[in-house]
Image (cartoon, rainbow, N blue to C red):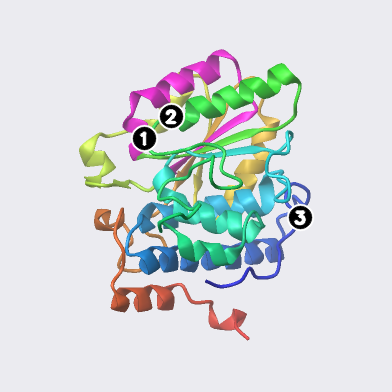
Amino acid sequence: MSQPSASVPLVGSDRHHTEQVILDLEKRAREIRRTVVSMVYGVGSGHPGGSLSATDILTSLFFHQLRLDPTNPCWEDRDRFILSKGHAAPALYASLAMRGFFPVEELSTFRRLDSRLQGHPDRNKTPGVEMTAGALGHGLAIGAGLALSARLDGRSFRSYVLMGDGELQAGVVWEGAMMASKYRLDNLTAIVDFNGVQLDGMVADIMPLDPLADKWRAFGWHVLEIDGHNLRQVLEALDEVPKLHAKPTVIIAHTIKGKGVSYMENKSAWHGRAPTPEQYDQAMADLAEPEANRG
C-alpha cells in the first residue's frame, strides 16, 4: 500500500476551492482508488465497483469538509459520517487510514482473520467508523437520530449519510426520510451515490427510482443534484448545505460504477468481485498519475 501523499488543506477550515485544492483532492482520490483495487485484489474479495463510484465523495468529505480529530475519534463535537452502503468499506478504510485514524499499512489486513477491517464496517472494531453496516437501508434513520441528538444536546456537529441508489429500494430509507423531515433536521445531509448499477443489473430495470429528486422533495427535503465525480461541484454542494435551513438536504450525486477502471465502469459484475493479476495491472495503469503530475 502507498503511504499518504502530502496533506491537503486543513479539514473543516479552508473553504476556498482554488485550482490547487481541486488538484490535491483529485490526486488523493486517485490514490484512494488505487488502494481500493489493491485491497480487493490482495485478499481476493470485496466490492470495488461501488467503492470507486463513491471515492470522490469520500475524498471531499474526509479531506476537506468533515470536522474530525483522528487522534480522538470519539471527540463529542466531531461531524458524524455514516457509510450506509457498507459494502463500499474499502474506500472508507482507505480514507480513514490516509486521514490518520490508523496506520496505512493496516489496509493490507482487509477482510483477513482477526483484522479490524471487516468486509463491512464495524464501529466496535475500527476507529472512525460511526455505524456497523451490513443490511442496507438503516444509515439514514441512524444519521437522523444523531442529528436530532445534536440538537437536543445543543451541539454543533453535522451528520452525513452516504447511501447507494439500489439501497433506496429499501422501505426503511423512506421511514428515516420522513422522520428527518418531521423534525426539520437541517443538520443532516444525505448523499446518494447514484451510479445506476446494483448487484444484479441496472437500477432502472430492477426497481426504477425516477423521478428521484421529486420523491425527496415530496418527503420534505432540499434537493441538490451534481456530477459526483466533479470535485468542484461536490465541494460547492457541501458548502451550500449549511446555508439551507428548516429541512434536511439530500445531494444526488450522479456517478459511474467502477469509476476510473476501464473494464469495471458501468458493469454490475464488478459490484463484488476481485480482479485477476492481468486485470489488476490494467487497473493500476488506468489509475496511474497523469504524466504532468509525476516526478
Amino acid, disc 2: His
Name the element at disc 3: loop
- The residue indicated by pointer 2 is 138
Name the element at disc 2: loop
Mark-to-mark CA distance, 2 and 1: 7 Å
Question: Are there few (<14), some (14-19), or many (20+) residues within 10 Å of tag 2?
Answer: many
**Residue 148 percent across, percent down from the top left:** 63, 20
Residue 183 is covered by the magenta coloring:
yes
Q: Nearer the viewer, mark 3 or mark 2?
A: 2
**Residue 11 percent across, percent down from the top left:** 72, 51
Question: Circles 3 and 1: CB distance less than 8 Å?
Answer: no
From where the camera sits, is residue 140 visible? yes
Query: Which callout, 3 or 2, points at the residue further toward the start of the chain?
Result: 3
Name the element at disc 1: loop
**Residue reaching furthest to the bottom:** 295
Query: Which callout, 3 or 1, points at the residue further toward the start of the chain?
Result: 3
Amino acid, disc 3: Leu
Residue at 54% x, 40% y is: 124
Q: Is residue 183 above or below residue 237?
A: above
In this picture, which residue range is highlighted in magenta? 166-193
**Residue 118 percent across, percent down from the top left:** 44, 50
Question: Are there few (<14), some (14-19), or many (20+) residues within 10 Å of tag 3?
Answer: few
Looking at the image, residue 1 sits to the left or right of residue 205; the answer is right
Residue at 67% x, 47% y is: 65
**Residue 230 percent across, percent down from the top left:** 54, 56
- The residue indicated by pointer 1 is 135
| Marking on residue 270 | none
